[in-house]
Amino acid sequence: LADLWRAGAWMPNHQRFRQGVVHHMQCFGQEVSLAGQCFLLMLFLLITVVQLPCLLIDLPMATSLYGLRGILDHHANEACGQFMYILSVLTWYRTYTVVIRGVAQAVLVPPACMSIQLRCLP
């Protein structure tokens, strides 16, 4: 403390004091930003529920807010990827139902038309 006092770091009107305050306020802002990002990612993962078991396994590995944000970001990306896969499967399902419906109509419509034509003959 004596060294800080001699260097002028404890005097509010000194430049070093101001630089220290500014530095600590910037660090505090970064920590608040990281905490907000972690909160939003955790909320997203809780809502989606898809990656929740894997997240609970990986969560104890986080040693800092940066690590926690990285883990949450990874699992959020995985959850989005799985939702996109589900949507693509639904798209494939729709495509196959349209194809199967088209093939069924192509196979069944001509005989139906032929039977109607044959019924109309005397």
Image (cartoon, grey):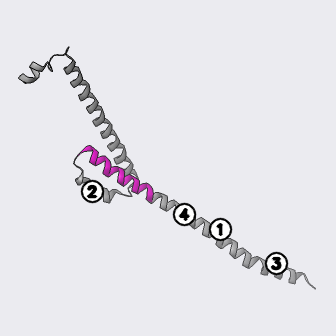
Residue with the mark numbered 2: 58
Q: Amino acid at mark 3?
A: Cys
Distance between the Cα atoms at labels 2 and 1? 42 Å
Residue span colored magenta: 63-81
Of pointers 3 and 4, the one earlier in the residue sequence: 4
Q: Residue at x 57, y 66 (%)?
A: 92
**Which type of secondary structure does the marked residue at label 2 adopt?**
helix
Residue with the mark numbered 4: 90
Residue with the mark numbered 3: 113
Quarter of the figure with residue 40: top left
Q: Amino acid at mark 1?
A: Val
Distance between the Cα atoms at labels 3 and 2? 63 Å
User: Residue most toward the front?
Assistant: 7
- Image coordinates of residue 66 in percent, x first then y, are 28, 45
Q: Is residue 85 magenta?
A: no
- Residues at discs 3 and 2 in contact (Cβ within 8 Å): no
**Which type of secondary structure does the marked residue at label 1 adopt?**
helix
